[in-house]
Image (spheres, rainbow, N blue to C red):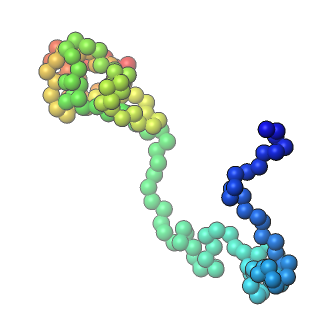
Amino acid sequence: MRIDTLTPAEGATTAKKRLGRGIGSGLGKTSGKGHKGQWARSGGGVRPGFEGGQMPLIRRVPKRGFNNHFKKSYSIVNLSVLDQFDANSVVDIAALNDKGLIKLVKGSVGLKVLGNGTITKALTVKADAFSAQAKEAIEKAGGKAEQI
């Protein structure tokens, strides 16, 4: 095999339209552009979103919403999930991810523990943020809530 013998796969390419080559081609005379008008002219046509001069939809509909570029998004876990770990073990984002217990949020800044559910074992939980209820429950069970 040589590089000069390589060709695209069968059906991968289509022949270009040969416009204005007689009536037998089906694309003679006006070359598929019809008769006169803006679309038949050289450089003719309108930009995307143009609605013939009426106020376009994009300008008729009011602007709404706001995207905060400084928002911190966390991968979230509840206390009920932490209870699946063995007593006296260290729970961090890597351990939770290995067990498939959290969903890593794109662009997340770390792990946040929320206080939904109960915890019965003493665990060392390492996270970027804790709710007050979660921190209290972990320490009440004899564990440690370490903020990274």
Name the residue: 22% across, 12% down.
88
Q: As displayed, is residue 128 above or below residue 72?
A: above
Q: Residue furthest bottom?
A: 35
Q: Nearer the viewer, residue 99 or 46?
A: 99
Q: Find residue 24 and report its image quarter.
A: bottom right
Which quarter of the rendering shows the C terminus? top left
- Foreground residue, 27 or 129? 27
**x and y percentages locating residue 56 in the rendered image:** 57, 73
Q: Residue at x 68, y 58 (%)?
A: 11
Q: Using the rendered view, name the quadrant where residue 122 is placed.
A: top left
- Spot occupied by residue 47 in the image (x, y as percentages of width and height): 68, 69
Which of 80/24 is in front? 24
User: Residue shown at 84%/78% (left/top)?
Assistant: 20
Taking 129 as reference, is 142 left or right? left
Seen as rendered, the residue at the extreme top is 88
Visible in this render: residue 40? Answer: no
- Horizontal relation, residue 122 to residue 91: left or right: left
**Residue 41: where, in percent of width, then height?**
80, 79
